[in-house]
Amino acid sequence: MFKNLLPTILAAACMLSGTSAADVKPVDFVTDVKPILTSRCIGCHHSGALFGELNLENHALAFKKRAAGPVILPGKPDSSPLHYVLKLPPKDVKAMPPTGHRIPDREMKVIYDWIKQGAHWPEGAAGVVTPARND
């Protein structure tokens, strides 16, 4: 009985929020998230500079258990420290990035939407985030 009401309930929720299922763009790790991690995060969060016990070089390292708990909680962006630290005021000691330019709102939304959509991070070469070399 309730199963038949689900499409009606979803349609009503979309109407009330002003969005539709078509408005929600799937976030792709390789084209949307990886460039943000590469330009904004990996410089400090890699095996050579493991700030906050966080290594964002690949899926296994990013989701590795840490003493402070997980950084990415798939489906829960508001509870994920990765998103939380990006939206902190610049003067907060936990704000990321700690120096330089703040992450633009559109990039924060990409991270938020990616986590909300399950934080899919591919294995293999597509999921590798490489820090820039200082040769």
Image: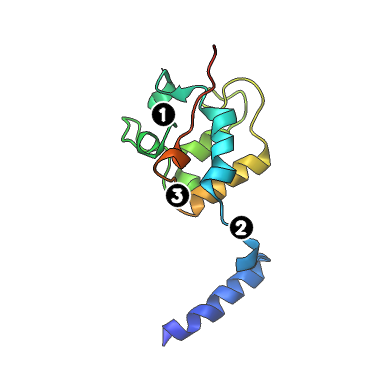
Q: CA distance from mark 2 to mark 3?
A: 14 Å
* Number of residues whose C-alpha sits closer than 10 Å to that of mark 3, classed few (under 14), some (14–19) or many (20 or more): some
What residue is shown at x 56% (from left), y 51% (from top)?
27
Residue at point 41%, 46% (across, down) = 73
Residue 135: % across, % down = 54, 11
Please say if the residues under marks 1 and 2 sit with CB atoms less than 8 Å apart.
Answer: no
Residue under pointer 2: 25
Q: Residue 24: give its label.
A: none
Residue ID for mark 3:
120
Dot placed on the residue nearer the N-terminal end, 2 or 3: 2
Q: In this view of the protein, can residue 87 be seen by the observer?
A: no
Q: Secondary structure at mark 1?
A: loop
Name the residue that disc number 1 marks: 55
Q: Amino acid at mark 3?
A: His
Is residue 59 positioned above or below 133 on the image? below
Which is nearer the eye, 10 or 29? 29
* Mark 1 or 2, nearer chain start: 2
Q: Nearer the viewer, residue 7 or 90?
A: 7
